[in-house]
Image (cartoon, rainbow, N blue to C red):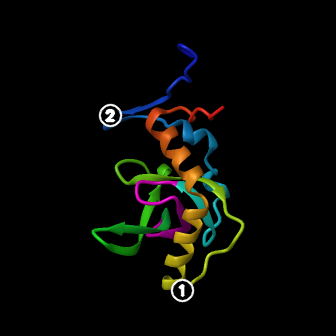
């Protein structure tokens, strides 16, 4: 620790150097991820995702809004590595997600709204690699 800040771990390989987010200390271990179940995640395009395995890779199906269009997309688990591993599962949600795509879009939107404060806190932690200070 330097100045009370947590140490940033770095993974180094010939092709990749990136800081390990503090969020990884709280991630659901890959072996504990249950396919078909929903997780609060930290990802580029969503905060709630349904675990899946596609083409041998672990990912999370999530709701994305872009240019006025809302659709389902996949972000791959952090452990899939750069440049595609962008999603970190942080906790299993109690409610099982629906199977129907339209129902899933609505379900994901509702659960993201319910968890918006936690999702924002995770973004703060990812951006500054420390937890957000709590208001007095």
Residue 132 versus residue 12: which sits nearer the camera? 132
Q: Quadrant of residue 4?
A: top right
For label 1, the residue is: 100
Q: Is residue 10 magenta?
A: no
Q: Quadrant of residue 73?
A: bottom left
**Residue 125 vertical placement versus 90 (above, below):** above
Residue drawn at point x = 55 percent, y = 44 percent: 121
Residue drawn at point x = 57 percent, y = 75 percent: 107
Q: Earlier in the sequence, mark 2 or mark 1?
A: 2
Q: Is residue 45 magenta?
A: yes
Residue drawn at point x = 41 percent, y = 59 percent: 45
For the record, the magenta segment spans 42-56
**Residue 47 vertical placement versus 29 (above, below):** below
Mark 1 burial class by Cα count in 10 Å: few <14, some 14-19, many 20+? few
Mark 2 burial class by Cα count in 10 Å: few <14, some 14-19, many 20+? few
Q: Residue furthest left?
A: 67
Percent from the top left, x then y, of residue 23?
A: 56, 41
Percent from the top left, x then y, of residue 111?
A: 59, 67
Residue drawn at point x = 56 percent, y = 68 percent: 50
Percent from the top left, x then y, of residue 75?
A: 43, 61
State the CA–CA distance, disc 2 to disc 1: 43 Å
Q: Residue furthest front?
A: 136
For label 2, the residue is: 14
Q: Is residue 34 left or right of residue 55?
A: right
Dot 1 falls on a residue whose secondary structure is: loop
Task: Say which quadrant the C terminus sits in.
Answer: top right
Residue 9 versus residue 105: which sits nearer the camera? 105
**Residue 41 vertical placement versus 34 (above, below):** above
Task: Say which quadrant the N terminus sits in.
Answer: top right
Label 2–label 1 contact, CB within 8 A: no
Dot 2 falls on a residue whose secondary structure is: loop
**Residue 135 vertical placement versus 64 (above, below):** above
């Amino acid at each position: 620790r330097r100045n009370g800040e947590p140490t940033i771990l770095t993974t180094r390989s010939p092709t990749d150097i990136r800081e390990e987010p503090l969020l990884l200390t709280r991630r659901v271990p890959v072996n504990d991820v249950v396919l078909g179940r929903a997780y609060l995640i930290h990802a580029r395009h969503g905060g709630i995702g349904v675990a899946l395995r596609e083409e041998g890779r672990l990912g999370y199906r999530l709701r994305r809004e872009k240019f006025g269009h809302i659709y389902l997309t996949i972000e791959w688990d952090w452990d899939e590595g750069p440049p595609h591993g962008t999603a970190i599962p942080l906790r299993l949600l109690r409610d099982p997600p629906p199977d129907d795509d339209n129902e899933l879009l609505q379900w994901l939107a509702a659960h993201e709204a319910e968890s918006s404060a936690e999702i924002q806190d995770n973004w703060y932690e990812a951006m500054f690699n420390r937890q957000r200070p709590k208001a007095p």
